[in-house]
Image (tube, grey):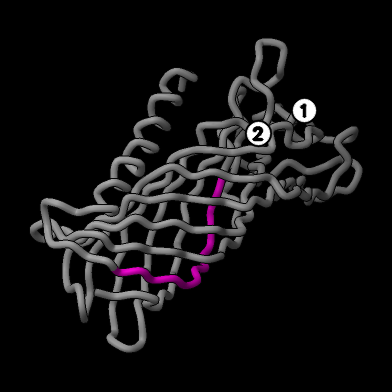
């Protein structure tokens, strides 16, 4: 994906969120709401890094969790309109699929064990959503869809491998790209587009329980991507399953 197209996608996601703010500040068309709830969220992320040149990968598993704020501003016909934001810790990264052309595991000649390599990259993530819901508002279930920009700040990284790079078995590998194995993250700021859908169940006096599936597409790279650099692209992508609990601070 070209940098121009990435920029357009990110601007669209950002504008989706920004346009929803004035609607929440003063709703003029639908039924006004003034509900504020806060709480916690937790989930599990399956992530990869989109490398060019290609690096064969499995999904990398990692935890995510943090704090959630939701402000309901308007009900327009059957749509309940809100803005939502999170502050999360997240473990992302990649796990290499080290196989030969016959899809068999590549054995390291020194250790005699199948070669394994994974990288975990930890972030503080801040997604901002325009949130639309349909269903029961005061008690019961509602279906929701949300989308918007997400920003990430690099915290650190760790590597798990069972071989030395100098003795890696490149002869038998179907994918011989290994430059990433010795490169630390170069770009500490991540950004992209997140979107998800799920179900929220409201219990009066107890709060709100949310279950969501979410996808994140990174528009930034973890490595420099000039003509002099090895990778032309190295962006995050992740599928997240998340639960959240919110309680009301203000409800009209």
Side (left or right) of 78 relative to 24? left
Q: Which residue is at the far bottom?
A: 205
What's the CA distance linking mark 2 and mark 1? Answer: 28 Å
* Residue sitting nearer the eye, 62 or 248: 248
SS majority, magenta: strand
Local SS, label 2: loop
Return the mark for residue 171. 1
Q: Mark 2 highlights which residue?
A: 222
Local SS, label 1: loop
Please provide percent x and percent y for residue 202: 28, 79
Residue drawn where x is 63% and y is 38% of the image: 189
Q: Is residue 16 above or below residue 34?
A: above
Q: Is residue 53 above or below residue 137?
A: above
Side (left or right) of 157 relative to 131? right
**Quick check: is 237 in the magenta stretch?**
no
Image quarter where the C terminus lies is bottom left
Residue drawn where x is 64% and y is 45% of the image: 153
Residue drawn where x is 38% and y is 44% of the image: 148
**Residue interval drawn in magenta:** 35-47
Please provide percent x and percent y for residue 35: 30, 69
Side (left or right) of 16 relative to 91? left
* Residue sitting nearer the eye, 37 or 153: 37
- The image quarter in which residue 12 lies: top left
| Disc nearer the start of the sequence (2/1) | 1
Please provide percent x and percent y for residue 247: 40, 78
Question: Label 1: few (<14), some or many (≥20) within 10 Å?
Answer: few
Please provide percent x and percent y for residue 44: 53, 62
* Residue sitting nearer the eye, 118 or 14: 14
* Residue sitting nearer the eye, 129 or 45: 129
Side (left or right) of 67 relative to 248? right
- The image quarter in which residue 165 lies: top right
């Amino acid at each position: 994906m070209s940098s121009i197209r990435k920029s357009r996608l990110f601007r669209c996601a950002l504008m989706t969120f920004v346009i929803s703010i004035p609607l929440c500040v003063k709703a003029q068309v639908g039924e006004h709401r003034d509900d504020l709830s806060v709480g916690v969220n937790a989930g599990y992320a399956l992530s990869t890094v989109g490398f060019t040149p290609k690096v064969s990968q499995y999904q990398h598993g990692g935890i995510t969790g943090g704090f959630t704020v939701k402000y309901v501003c308007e009900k327009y016909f059957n749509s309940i309109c809100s803005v939502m934001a999170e502050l999360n810790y997240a473990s992302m990264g990649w796990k290499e699929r080290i196989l030969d052309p016959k899809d068999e595991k590549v054995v390291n000649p020194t250790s005699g064990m199948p070669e394994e390599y994974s990288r975990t990259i930890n972030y503080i993530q801040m997604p901002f959503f325009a949130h639309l819901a349909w269903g029961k508002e005061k008690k019961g279930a509602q279906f929701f869809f949300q989308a918007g920009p997400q920003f990430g700040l690099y915290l650190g990284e760790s590597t798990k491998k069972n071989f030395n790079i100098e003795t890696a078995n490149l002869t038998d590998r179907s994918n011989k790209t290994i430059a990433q194995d010795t490169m630390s993250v170069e770009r500490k700021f991540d950004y992209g587009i997140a979107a998800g859908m799920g179900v929220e169940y409201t219990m009066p006096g107890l709060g709100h329980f949310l279950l969501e599936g979410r996808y994140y597409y990174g528009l930034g790279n973890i490595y420099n991507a000039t003509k002099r650099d090895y990778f032309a692209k190295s962006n995050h992508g992740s599928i997240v399953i998340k639960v959240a609990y919110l309680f009301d601070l203000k409800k009209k």
